[in-house]
Image: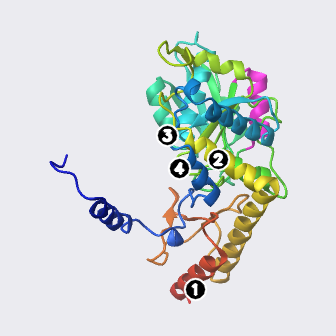
Amino acid sequence: MLNKGRSEADLFSFLETKKEEDLDYRFILSSMCTLPHPVAVRAHSMFIETNLGDPGLFPGTASLEQLLIERLGSLFHLSTAGGYSTSGGTESNIQALRLAKEHKKKIKSPNIVVPESAHFSFKKACDILCLEMRTVPLDKTLKMDAHKAAEIIDKNTVCLVGIAGTTEYGAVDPIPELAKIASEQDLFFHVDAAFGGMVIPFLDRPLPFDFALPGVTSIAVDPHKMGLSVIPSGCLLVRDPQMLSLLNIDTPYLSVKQEYTLSGTRPGAPAVSALAVLDYLGNEGMRAVVSGCMKNTWRLIDGMETFGVERAITPVLNVATFICNKAPDRWKVSWTRRDHLRIICMPHVHREQIEEFLVDIGGMYV
């Protein structure tokens, strides 16, 4: 602590110098987060002091959180879905596995079955919850092999996980096949759609991944990714709202006497921010956002292939990966575990940036 406070001008001058050290989003091609929509920022500012951890003090904000869940539930073909606003996919995945474990609490040595492409949050969740994590290899298209998943499941399996938009490649696992397996085995089936959940429904040809499939038990989705909300903003949705009560703990001194959330204090502003974007853009607006991102993705792929740089897989979402070992220095890209160049064409990545990147990388190949 400073012994004596500093002036506001001096303080914000210092903060500004630190902010300038951050990378400019214009050159960030590796992130699944993006610049928040102005409507999201305005809504966030309006509700900055609200705490959904004590919802009786903020009934208006709590009602907006439930409206957000209704909007997402309808988007995922189940308007009666339950759920709540989380800090993002990691929390949502942890909570889904808590539910799965509690649902089969009589199992003494529980395990979960996940694809090799599962987000690292599942490793965290398994460490916390003392779950064995069984990993299923991917097929040639880098999707979970459903047949091999079925072989790994046993009497101690409490949860099957499928990914709708993998972090590295944007691949969508065979969710219908996995949902069928889960139904036949009476398994909790969690779909991690942190990225794809706000992309797939707005594609010209949406892939089945949500509650329209009877076997899907829960879904994680992150509005702070393609939903253009502020960071952090995630949601966990469940088919049966009553299932959330499995996680209830007593909170005798709050305005509610029980809570099933992971965090105690929970900011209301991100939930309102996410709702604000959805209501402002509507289905038509979201389709336009996703369409623009997909067009840029294919322009990037076409441009790279003119230089002889092959795609690693053919994408279904706005994630492009290439068999390539170099990229221009001024652009922030990333590399997969298989050493493929990875670029995500988020809403902040406009056509002019794609063209600039192609000019730069063309100079490395021509």
Residue closest to the far left: 3
Label 3, secondary structure: give it.
Answer: loop
Q: Position of residue 10 (x, y in %)?
A: 27, 63
In terms of depth relative to the viewer, which is nearer, 321 or 358? 358
Kindly report the distance in space between the C-alpha atoms of the residues bearing marks 3 and 4.
Answer: 16 Å
Q: CA distance from mark 1 to mark 2?
A: 36 Å
Q: Nearer the viewer, residue 155 or 21?
A: 21
At label 1, which amino acid type do we have? Val
Reply above or below: 17 against 166: below
Seen from the viewer's position, the closer of residues 187 and 25 is 25
- Name which residue type carries label 4: Ile
Q: Say which element carries label 4.
A: loop
Residue under label 3: 49
Q: Are marks 3 and 1 in contact (CB under 8 Å)?
A: no
Task: Tell me the kind of residue under disc 2.
Answer: Ala
Q: Nearer the viewer, mark 1 or mark 2?
A: 2
Write the start and end of the magenta stretch as one range. Answer: 174-187
For label 4, count other residues whose C-alpha is less than 10 Å away and answer few (under 14), some (14-19) or many (20+).
Answer: some
Which comes sooner in the sequence, label 4 or label 1? 4
Q: Which residue is mark 2?
A: 274
Residue at the spot x=62%, y=83% of the render?
A: 307
Real-space CA distance between mark 3 and mark 1, rounded to the nearest whole angstrom: 46 Å
Q: Is disc 2 surrounded by few (<14), some (14 to 19) or many (20+) residues within 10 Å?
A: many
Are the two marked residues, 1 and 2, in contact with CB atoms closer than 8 angstroms? no
Report the amino acid beneath label 3. Glu
For mark 1, what is the residue?
A: 359
Which residue in the structure is indicated by mark 4? 231
- In the rendered image, residue 81, in percent from the top left (x then y), is placed at 75, 30
Say which residue appears at 60% left-offset and 36% top-offset. 85
Q: Confirm whether the magenta stretch covers residue 118.
A: no
